[in-house]
Structure formats: structure tokens, C-alpha cells
Image (cartoon, helix red, strand yellow):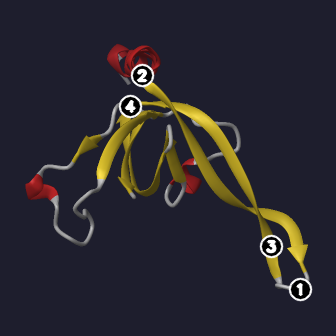
Amino acid sequence: MTALDLTIPGEVVNLLAEFGSTVTIKARAKGTDYDRVTRRNVSVEISGDVKASPLFEYSPRDIDGDNVKSGDAQAVMSATLPTGITEDLLNGSQFLKGDIGFRIVGVEKVESGDDVAAYVVQLRR
């Protein structure tokens, strides 16, 4: 690991804190309570705020109709996730920017050395 690997994650957090906007992430996690009627574990909604970049669209050449659909957007999100939300819960979670809601359908890690500096999330309405 180099000295640069140690500084990049902190710089990403600082840049998003300064230039990013606050978005809300809502995720559902399996709870520990068991519902005897439905015979399932009761899920729990977890939400919290995180800093993210402005949304940006995919280029037309990236839209393939399967993985990336017309209207999908991306955002760079801080790797500092809200309490209770793990990387595993991100995919399928809600991404709320003001009054506009999106579903996270893809997550890519931006890593520096062993640390995650940020997440690039694919958003769909």
C-alpha cells in the first residue's frame, strides 16, 4: 500500500462533503423476529443520509437494454454508509434525492488499496 492509497479515501469523502448533496438511502434488512402467520422473518427498514455527487446519465453507447436501460443514471456515493446499511444491502435499496426516488440496481466499488473510497451506483426510476 502506498501513501497515495492512504490519502485517496479521505479526499473522496472531503470532496463529496464539500461539493455533493445529501441523499437518503432506504434499505430493507431481514429482521430477527419470526412471523408465524406468514412463516417469514419480518424485515426491518433502515434509512440514513449519505453524501453523493450530482446524477449523471449513461452515454448512449453504454445503454444495452439489459444491464443499462434508457433513463438509468449514475451517482458517486460516499463509502461512509449510514448506520445499519451494509454494502450487501445497497443493491435494491431506494436512493432518494429530494422528492425524486430511484432504485439502486447496480453497485461498483471504487477502491484505493484495501479501502473503499466510494461507490458508483446505477439508479433506475
Residue 16's tag is 2
Q: Position of residue 59 (x, y in %)?
A: 13, 49
In depth, the one of 117 and 58 nearer the eye is 58
| Front tag of 3 and 1 | 1
- Mark 2 and mark 3: span between their CA atoms? 36 Å
Residue 62, image x and y in percent?
14, 57
Badge 3 density bin: few <14, some 14–19, many ≥20, Cα 10 Å: some
Q: Is residue 92 left or right of residue 41?
A: left
Q: In this view of the protein, which residue sits in the foreground, 2 or 89? A: 89
Query: Which of label 3 and label 4 is nearer to you?
Result: 3
Q: Earlier in the sequence, mark 3 or mark 4?
A: 3
Q: State the residue at coordinates (54%, 32%).
A: 50
Residue 55, which numbered label?
none
Circles 2 and 3 in contact, beta carbons < 8 Å: no
Horizontally, residue 28 falls left or right of residue 9, namely: right
Q: Nearer the viewer, mark 4 or mark 2?
A: 2
Q: Which residue has dot 1 on it?
A: 37
Instruction: Please give the name of the residue rendered at 64% of the width and 46% of the height, measured from the top-left corner.
Output: 85
